[in-house]
Image (spheres, coloured by chain):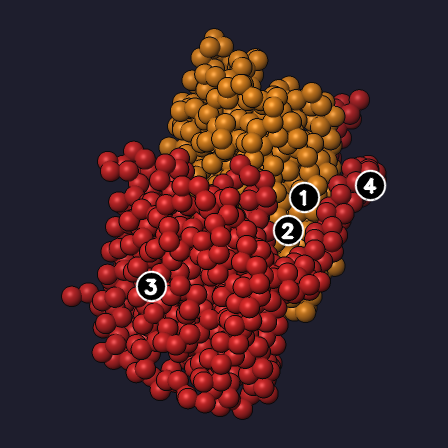
Chain colours: A red, B orange
Amino acid sequence: MMSATALAAVAALLPFGAAVIGMLFGRRLPFGPAPVAVLGTAAATVLAIVVAVDVAGAPTAVWESSTQLTPTGLIPITLGVRVDSLSATVAVMVTVVALAVQVYSVGYLRGDPRYSSYAALISLFTSAMLAVVLCNDLLVIYVGWEIMGICSYFLIGHYWEDPPTSAAAVKSFLMTRFGDVGFLFGIFVLGMAAGSFRLTDVLNAVPGMNPSTVLAGTLLLTAGIVGKSAQFPLHSWLPDAMAGPSPVSALIHAATMVASGAYMVARMYPAFEAAPATLNVIAVLAVISMLGSALAALATDDLKRVLAYSTISQLSVMFAALAVGGRIQAVGHLLSHAAFKALLFLCAGAVIHAVGSNLMAHMGGLARAMPVTFVTMTVGFAALAGVPPTSGFFTKDAVLSAALESTAATAWLVIAGVLATVLVTAAYATRAWLRTFFGLRTAGSAASVHEAPWIMLGPLVALAVPALLLGFGGLRWHELRPEVGPALFSVLLAALGAGLAYVAWRRDPAHEPATVLGRLRPVFASAFGTDDLYERTVAVAVLRLARGVVGVDDRVVGRAVTGTGRGARTLGGVLRLTQNGNPQFYVTGVLAGVLLIAVGVAVLS
Amino acid sequence: MTLVLLLAVPLVASALVLALPPRHAIPTAVAATGGTLAIAVIAAARFDYGSAHAMQQGVDWAWIPPIDVRLHLGIDGISLPLVVLTALLTALCAIYLGRREAPELARPRAFVALLLLLEVGMLGTFVALDLLVFFVFFELVLVPMYAVIAGWGGPGRRPAANQFILYTLLGSGVLLVGLLVIYAQTGTLDMVVLAARAGDGLSHTVQVIAFLLVAGGLAVKVPMWPLHSWLPDAHTEAPTVGSVLLAGVLLKMGTYGMVRIAVPVLPEGALFWAPWLGALGVVGIVYAALACLAQRNLKRLVAFSSVGHMGFVLLGIATLTPVGMNAALFANIAHGLITGLLFFLAGGIAQRYGGTDMATIGGGLLAKAPHLGSLLVLASVASLGLPGLAGFWGEMLAMLSAFQPAPGLDRGLFLGFMAIAGLGAVLTAAYFLVMIRRVAHGVAPPRWHGVGLLDATGRELLAWAPLVLFAFVAGLWPRVLLGVTDPAVRALLGGG
């Protein structure tokens, strides 16, 4: 039998192989592009589960493999995996969600002429994400990290005929890449200090490092993590990324890529623990993002954008947990969030597929017409709102308990932030649930609404199970067991939020309940105007600078260089005459120089 | 002897083609460049990778005995990849010339003769081990390239060709003076001997002056900001094949000269000027990216992007570390593959749309010509330095080298360079993605409605596929290049 590390490596490579086959042969494959894409991911899922079962037998074991990828002239780059309970568990989550999304996409993109490249890109993405999860060398992780980014760009831009979609794709890639530069430099700082880019070596070397080195390294890594996980101030790409197809949002912009930021902090936790200042920064950014995006979700009418803001907010909950020492709690929430948020996006896809619009104003009263979607999405919303006994209830509560026990300077901030977010989350989840499934059928939802085909419903049911029950699986760890006091309090807060949303909606079920927010509504809906601000400052400044450069290049540099060039030519001639040396060479040199000048003059005249 | 044959085949063919009937010109070009490529592959196959640091397959014949000029040729891990790249790109250019859908090439015999002569010069530059022989080959390239631009270029070819030859001749003049200074002070033209001496026998002042002259002369060819302004015009006006070779090979001659001659022969001079080299390199990265962001012409955008990529190469060289040199050599090859492909694609687009003005094209290329559009997207993504493709490793290692420059260099300054280069990488992504948005995405404007557009043809794909393939190979398995250059670079910097 193969070792766990070899199995893990094969699991990461299988979707890559499927992607290559899909890209090269696509529609010419005997049974179309779907079987290769689905089977590649399915095989990876089986292997990931086998590895996770292996690891479960030895929870504290760390299995590694390593071979040199290339020399660099400095520290060589290695290729290898690091399998431990964290990476094995997250790998299972990635492959399961990817498999659900691949199956769902067969139905969702039926008849789409670009399905084959779409499926191949999803496979490539899965492989890159598994590389981030499993690989041991930080630079190889960076490779996977960036490939995820370009897959996200291509998949957001799936409907590239539409200019705003294309713009959203560009924005998402650039905002994340801006952070990724910091991430790369962070790798440089820690890797060079450790004398190795291998994660294991870096973590082993952290205790002996200069604290300011660790601080600089982790802060730089945080830049990339904030960008990838769409946290304030690099958050505004994620709502726009909803221009992509819903299954893409489910996989990339909910369960996996955006969560990889939190995963990396958990993975490199000893380094972050050694830099409390970095954790404090993360705590502050997380609390701002958590509450800010929850409020934005409360006022947005586009169902997918509501879920996007909700994703930002839930990712912040993970970061908040990490900031107060709750590593296991953060990972628990990462897993439960992956299940319920992927579920919510896939349900939203089914709804949008049926209604033909993203706007909740065009939905309403769908519960009867789409019973399976209704039930599964209800599970998703309940988990999001933290209703017991769904998975979200357990893990959110675990985060709260971690903050209560923490001695970190930011613990009080995290507690206040999480409690406020619980209230707002329940409110916006209730609002979205009511707006979508209850009330009167609107013009959009009245006509021939039908339940999605079984190939889309299957993944919904499959994801609803962990969204509902995953919390019980976590009871093995004492960190993930709920504590009565805080749990009760947060459930009460959630009930209050849900009740307020219900009251607002009840006044007039046909209309937008968010109108009760009054003048705050547009402020929330625009995410406090951050996007507008970036557009007006950064984008405008860069473009102005660019136009300036083109102007300068045309007018000044060209002429100045031509001018100095003429001067240099004269000077060169003079120097050549004064050159002392071997006589024959001297003559040859002068001849060559004269020849050069003669040609130059001939050409110019 | 392999290396002599490598130069002799295109040289003889270049003379031969003039004697043949015009319709045989392009088949001759394909045969001759194909033969040269085969020889380059044989040289690569016979290359002893275990001692990539040493000069191999050398010849050393007396040429001008009175001044001890010798026809001294050889390859090591630094030159081998460039030799193969040159032979490959020239062969692909010849294949591309033979595509049927193209408007007929005017004066094919002259064009092919120039192309082959160009190949002799390019290959010679990379295998020469005598300063004067290096210089001769370096110069040999200019004339055919000038003639190709001036004779077969676009409407503005005259001024563009003149500017090209003026700039590069100025550079050559300064370079020649620099080489003369080295010779005058050391009494030898042998590059291997000079590199082994590592500046021994050259006073600090002489090194500082000689480095300024040599590197300054080479910098025009790189081109280093602010000496770049010949490049966009030359590229915009040059025929496709000229652009491909100009970007793919000619630009590398400048940085190759720095790695091969300027840095190892004049280490103290290098130490003195390295901060300036790095500064101008990173200025070039950001400047080129900004210029590209506001660029309206696709071919000009690709041309300007070269200035940025060469900025990364210069930054790597400026750190004077093995990792920096490796980065520079890797980025050289990657740029040759990717930008070569981009110029091929720009040529294909120009042929179909009658120009490369992005407003005229107006978008929708992916819908009108899916293969051409997909290749443009792929090449752009490779060029912006996406990991998994060739463009990544050079840029990443250049920044890594700036993180820890050679002892004697100001680390804080180079950290600043690294940060600026990182910002430039983001801007690079920005202009390529904006370009894709404007050209490939969207819907074709009304003026192209009902106009059929030829997708990439079999012959075009034949010429482009190897570049795509190698961009992936180098991206996924960087050892194929780094494993070859690393020992040679270490030996060169170690003084032996």
Determine contact: label 3, label 1, CB under 8 Å: no
Which quadrant would the C terminus of chain A be assigned to in this image?
Answer: top right
Q: Nearer the viewer, residue A455 or A357?
A: A357
Determine contact: label 2, label 3, CB under 8 Å: no
Q: Residue furthest left?
A: A1
**Three-letter residue code for mark 3:** Ala
Which residue is the site of mark 4?
Answer: A556
Residue at horizontal 24 percent and vertical 36 percent from the top: A30
Determine contact: label 2, label 4, CB under 8 Å: no
Q: Residues within 10 Å of mark 2 (few under 14, many from 20)?
A: many
Query: Does residue B457 sit above or below B175 in this rendering?
Result: above
Mark identifier at residue B427: 2
Secondary-structure class at tag 2: helix
**Three-letter residue code for mark 4:** Val
Residue at horizontal 57 percent and vertical 63 percent from the top: A507
Which residue is the site of mark 1?
Answer: B293
Secondary-structure class at tag 3: helix
Q: Residues within 10 Å of mark 1 (few under 14, many from 20)?
A: many
Q: Nearer the viewer, mark 3 or mark 1?
A: 3
